Image (cartoon, grey):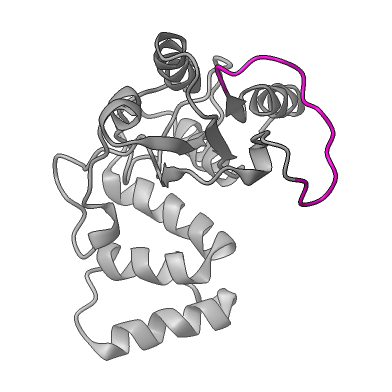
Amino acid sequence: MHRGKRTALVSMTAAVVVVTAISGAAQSAGANRLDGKLRTNQVQVLATHNSYHIQQDVPIPASDTTQYTHAPLDQQLESQGVRGFEIDVVNAPDGQFPVVHTPVVDATSNCTPLAQCLQVTRTWSEAHPGHVPIFILIEPKTDAVDRVIERLRSLGEREVPTSRVGDFVIRELAKLDKIAYIRFASVYRSFETPEDFRDALQEVKSPRKRRK
């Protein structure tokens, strides 16, 4: 992620980590002080992970962890009692921050870019004054996404086979998360035998032997 955009995202994150309709300056208090005041670090809330996620139209084979759909953010707030969100974002050339779980592989969201998700939350907050704080965790995805995008662009082709995209993604996964690499490889390469998994484990242990 470029330095300027990373700085902007950090600033944005700091500004929206807690959205609250409770006004007034915070007052200092000693440890464990009981004075009738509710402080942020005393609040426990119900939260959702990948709060924006929508199941793909074509489910990812052998990946139960992606087979779910969350209600829109305002519905989670209104009818499910949720007061905490986790939102993944990636960099984009236009300065926006698209909300996505895994580019290409698992990329459907109920709000995107990030500004839209925040606006949905703000609109609900303004309509419900006095609610407890809404906590928003924003997770910037790594520069691996940028590298995959740049490689695709460098091909100079209007259409790229999904197999080529998968090759780029699996290389980056191998660098970032060995377990994620094996899980993705088992689906992408259609593992059928224990030997397939053993070969993948060997590739993780010896990167020079990894398939290209």
Q: Quadrant of the N terminus?
A: top right
**Residue extending furthest left?**
58
Foreground: 9 or 169? 9
Residue at coordinates 32% horizontally, 46% vertically from top-left?
105
User: Vertically, is 97 above or below 162?
Assistant: above
Residue at coordinates 40% horizontally, 43% vertically from top-left?
50
Coordinates of residue 27 in the picture (x, y in percent): 81, 28
Foreground: 114 or 210? 114
* Residue 211 at least partly seen: no
Foreground: 122 or 100? 122
* Residue 144 at least partly seen: yes
Residue at coordinates 45% horizontally, 83% vertically from top-left?
201
Position of 60 with respect to 158 (left or right) is left
Q: How many marks?
A: 0
**Residue extending furthest front?**
35
Q: Quadrant of the C terminus?
A: bottom left
Residue at coordinates 56% horizontally, 38% vertically from top-left?
137
User: Vertically, is 73 above or below 81?
Assistant: above
Membership of 81 in magenta stretch: no
Residue 73: image quadrant is top left
Residue 93: image quadrant is top right
Magenta stretch, overall SS: loop
Coordinates of residue 78 in the picture (x, y in percent): 30, 26
User: Vertically, is 180 above or below 68?
Assistant: below
Range of magenta residues: 20-33
Coordinates of residue 6 in the picture (x, y in percent): 70, 29
Position of 12 with respect to 32 (left or right) is left
Coordinates of residue 55 in the picture (x, y in percent): 22, 42
Residue 156: image quadrant is top left
User: Vertically, is 76 above or below 205?
Assistant: above
